[in-house]
Image (tube, rainbow, N blue to C red):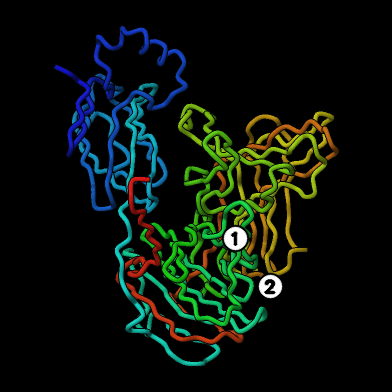
Amino acid sequence: MNKRILTFGAIALLSTINYVSAQEKNDEKAKQEQNQGKTIGKDYPTLVLNGADDKRVISVSLKDLDPNQDVTIVTPAGFSVNPSRIPAGTKDAKITLSLLSSKKKTEGVLAFRSGDKRTFINLIGKAENLPTKDLSTSPVYKGNDKSFLKKAVDGFKPTEKGYTVEFKVKSKDVGSGFFPYVVNGKGIGFKAFVNGDGTGFYSSKSEKGLSNRSTQFEGGLGKFYNTDDKFHVYRYAVAPDNRIFVYRDGLAIDTVRALDLGPQENFASGIGEPVENLLKNPGFEGEFDVVSATDKIATKIEGWDVVVGDRWNSQQFIIPAEIDNEQDFTNHVLKMERYMWADGWSAAEIAQVVDVAPNESYTLQALVRGGIKKEGDLLGKIKIQEVQDQSIGASVDVTGATWETYSLDYTTSANCKQIRVLFYLERDKWGAHITPMEIDNVKLTGRARTYEPKIGFDNDGSELAYFTYDLSGAYAPSKVPEINVVLDGSK
């Protein structure tokens, strides 16, 4: 019997969670894989999920495992599995695998582990295109007010199906601006801007501009000429995984993770209970974007802000790193490096803004090592910085070259609404030898904030034709501009 079984509806996992038969085990190639242990999933079965509704049941048969040890299942970013642990002593089990990501293509490796025994399944997720819908025929608002707001009591109750926001606006001059915003009951949302210079999002207090894909070619500036005395239609389609698909006049501009955007200080509506961890993606197992397949420098990290994006100043990576018997080579850490052949214009900073309560105590912990100059100078820190007053905060030096848990207790000031959790690697002289600083298992413990769903806008001098939203899902525009060229003849 061939034990490498892969069917449309299920995968059978046989012989102590291993797809490799006895004959294959004796194969020289299999021996090399076992000895090297470097290429996870290279020659393992592949399962493809087409869309969020394509849920797959995986049958797992277990044999001769430690009867006192559970089987743990490590799921890559963009997928989910239920359950994520198979109790010790189980002989046969079924787990359900789902695609969460709305990216066009998501790849990863599903890992099964019991003690030192592991096996893997390659996963490929292919998200379906967003359905289309025209929202212009039934606007929620038409008028000239400087602001607009709807809350849950007014019927604004976004669900896990996603939602879509659209408006048609004209920027009268460079100084005019239109600022739509939305937040759900979990505090996830965004505040955007459209002005005479362009469009983009706010990450806490910082502006993150978007570029015009239509002119991102050699010689192009990637600009939006919004002071052209024309109305332009903007749409934000927020998928169930909180990925924001941005459109302008029917054309796709960009895709942004809402989790990457620091919250606005006025999104929170109340003070909640103490929470074990207030951070997003605290173990760096979430999504991240890199410069290219060969250049692994991370440009965006889920939940975190790469404050310094200049690679010649600093570089950051998400890398696999075994820390102990529980966190093996499937574990990932954040690695921060200084560019050696420059003194740098800024410290390297990876940060996350968190809503907090005033006059409350918080504890920041992280597993960290490195950030030390060859001569012994300590250049790495973990920091807490208040957003409302950046002169207030606290920090702890990273002092060791081996993994150690660093802890920082902090009490917020009376006017504090948000803090920045910050990993900081200071610059030094040109040619300085500085060890990379590596971080994992970050935890911020303390009292959470609560949120009331709301949507609205502030208008500063722009001319608004309409503003609307749809809570039934994330929709692409129904009309997309096209230029089709047909060449007659064979030459």
Badge 1 amino acid: Gly
Identity of the residue drawn at 61% across and 84% down: 172
Badge 2 amino acid: Ala
Question: Mark 1 falls on what kind of element?
Answer: loop
Residue 367 visible in the displayed image: no
Would you name the residue on which mark 2 appears? 414
Q: Using the rendered view, name the quadrant where residue 62 is placed.
A: top left
Would you name the residue on which mark 1 appears? 222
Left or right of 23? Residue 366 is right
Residue 38 visible in the displayed image: yes
Left or right of 169? Residue 412 is right
**Sequence order check, earlier mark of 2 and 1:** 1
In this orientation, which residue lies closer to the viewer: 15 or 343?
343
Left or right of 120? Residue 454 is right
- Give neighbour class at mark 1: few <14, some 14-19, many 20+ (Cα, 10 Å): some
Rendering coords of residue 219 (x, y %): 64, 55
